[in-house]
Image (cartoon, rainbow, N blue to C red):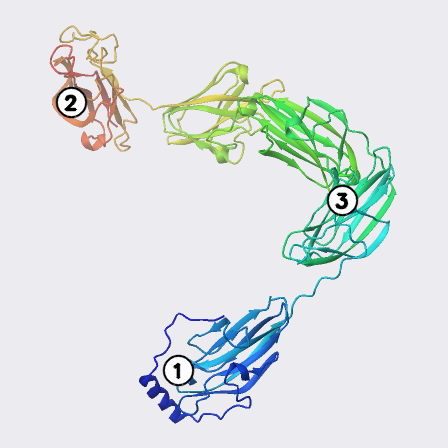
Amino acid sequence: MRFSLLTKPATGVLAALALGSLATAQVCPGDDIYEPNDDCASATPLAVGSLSNLAMIAGTNASNVPDFYSYTMADGEAVVIDVLFLHANGDMDLKLYSDAACTTQIDSSGSVSDNEQVEYTNNTGGALTVTLKVFPWNVPVCNDYSINLTSTPPPASCPDPDALEPNDDCASAVALSTGTTSNLTVWGTSNGSGINPDYYTFTVQDGEVATIDCLFTDVDGDIDLRLYSDAGTCATQVGYSGSTTDNEQIVHLNNTGAAVTYTLYVQPFGSGWDCNNYELNLDIVPSGFICPAADAFEPNDDCASAAALAVGSSGSLSVYGGGALGLNEDFFSYTAVNNEAVTIDVLFIDANGDIDVYLYDDAACTNQVGYGGSTTDNEQLTYTNTSGAPVTLTMKTRSWGSFDCNDYEVVISSVIDPCLSVVEDAFAPNHDCASAAPVTDGTYPGLATFKTVADDFFSVDVPDGATLNVDVLFLTANGDIDCYLYDGSTLGTTCGDKTTYLDNGFTGSDNEDMTWTNLTGSTQTYYIQVNLWDNAGNEDCNNYDLVIDIALPTMGTSMCAGDGSGIPCPCGNESADPESGCLNSTTLGAKCTATGSNVVANDDAVFHLSQAPAGQTAVLIQGTTQIAIPFKDGLLCMGTFTRRVEFATVDAAGEASTVGSIATNANLFPGQTRWYQWWHRDPVGSVCGNGSNTSNGLEITWL
């Protein structure tokens, strides 16, 4: 049925005027040859196909408004009736009736576009004459049209019950002979008489194999097979085949020790189909292979009944395939401790029946962690437990494909290795000089090296004159570690060869260290190699900490100490350090040092303050002459012309450093000798109560 929610065109005077002007321009056809068919009683009979040269004339030119047509439908037949016209020449609508008086409407179509369509399926159980009414929506109308009727015939009716009926339940099963039995029928859920299954019996001697093939076309209705070993009740199912494709097959071996009469159930499956034809073929032959009895681990046919295995070999096992004995899966369990690597080999000959294996790490066998499913001899599973606790694994062995049975053997091997829980550190992969991880001053804890993985490499830049100190900290009882230091020029050649090194550490005891001073005149890159000694008796892995210390070259001569060796401190607050100032609130004397070079053109000098009160302001001062007089809580070490070079804030460790250009801020020139010290605030706990203190002095001659 076609319909529209659009409003129909206006009727009345306006419409008449509009269509009247159209009629003036158009010459209407005369009545078609099927007139008079202006009421239900005079309906023109239709046939499948097209009917053309029809005319709808209404209003201005004639009064015979509607046209009626009839068609007789068979039971189950479906028809579609299209009325084709141009809407612009006059709108037409349709109604379809199922009675001779045209009072019972069964479909309609009333769009506001070209063409209309109605359709109907006769499910009355008998023949039915339907009547089509074609009528104008408004007048005047002057239009040609044609009718096209298409029909879908009713589906073919099912055949009568086959010659072996009635065999619709287990008790009425009929004997099935070997060979082919044809012209059999089952009815599906859509059949008016209801579902009609079939049952058959046949006898198989001990040691014989029965093969039952059911041949049918699945699109006409799906059929399944079930085989029972008890006649008359069908309570013990021993075989099943239920695909959704053409044909089904059951293969069954009788190894009960006696003859058995089996019952075959041919089951209509699914819905939406009436009936289907099928053919049965029964073949009974002596078995060429008798499967062994159940193995010693049975029953272990589900996860809950898994048989426990240990490291070693477990032989004389058997699994049944999807053939004569049905499917029989085997389940086994094994508990892996932490850091244990387990290998499970399932050994069998694939030609005797393919076996697949599955591995689970939970008691319900839902979390699969391994699978072996090749189509060759043997399967293997591996599992490594690094969870920190024991894990009980469950292995399932099952057949793949259709065969009677196969023998197999399970071999479990295990390695417990503490290194399994040791993972590569964040610097990996840094296993050669080219991929060395850059490091600077500091400590890098929790690193790992392995005998089975390449060594670890690090790169470090060392300024001219600075000394590089490398410490590798570890317990040799967990694995002896060696280290090597290479010059940057060996990159891409001999770097990492453990021969052309600058320094090394391989004492055979806890920890190793290396030291090297850069005297090249410029900053150099050096490479560090950390190696787990590859001796056969050594452990396979170890953790270590890497400590990098770059000691920059110091310059200047310490003077004006606060240890009382020159003049006493202001309030007897001398320190014990001959290179620091008088005691401050930290109970130590502030210390002034300098690193870098004394070459003005290099402009790389940095002054450092240590052992000062945290969070306080300090200033580096410069003088042109050396003196030593009490000043605040400390000593003033320079005089004449003094200069404040740079301010700094002491950090939480009591340290501060200059960051600006000393050459610029101190107005330096080659050949000058100058004296320096730090003056820092000390308002809380000032030893002498003056609120500030000084460091020792430093004398530097600039070049």
Res. 507 in view: no
Which tag, 3 or 1, sits closer to the chain's start? 1
Residue reaching furthest to the front: 101
**SS at circle 3:** helix
Find out whether the residues at labels 1 and 2 contact each other: C-beta distance under 8 Å: no
Q: Quadrant of the C terminus?
A: top left
Which tag, 3 or 2, sits closer to the chain's start? 3
Q: Where is residue 24? Give x, y as percent.
A: 38, 93
Task: State how far apart marks 3 and 2 are (Cα).
Answer: 119 Å
Nearest to the eye among marks 1 and 2: give it.
Answer: 1
Q: Amino acid at mark 2?
A: Gly
Above or below: residue 638 compared with residue 347: above
- What's the mark number on residue 623? 2
Residue reaching furthest to the top: 572
Which tag, 1 or 2, sits closer to the chain's start? 1
Q: Amino acid at mark 1?
A: Asn
Res. 346 in view: yes
Of residue 21 and residue 298, the one placed in the foreground of this image is 21
Identified at 19% across, 20% down, the residue is 678
Of residue 45 and residue 419, the one placed in the foreground of this image is 45
- What's the mark number on residue 170? 3
Residue ID for mark 1: 138
- What's the mark number on residue 178? none
Above or below: residue 665 compared with residue 132: above
Q: Is residue 94 left or right of residue 14?
A: right
Q: Is residue 253 left or right of residue 573?
A: right
Nearest to the eye among marks 3 and 1: give it.
Answer: 3
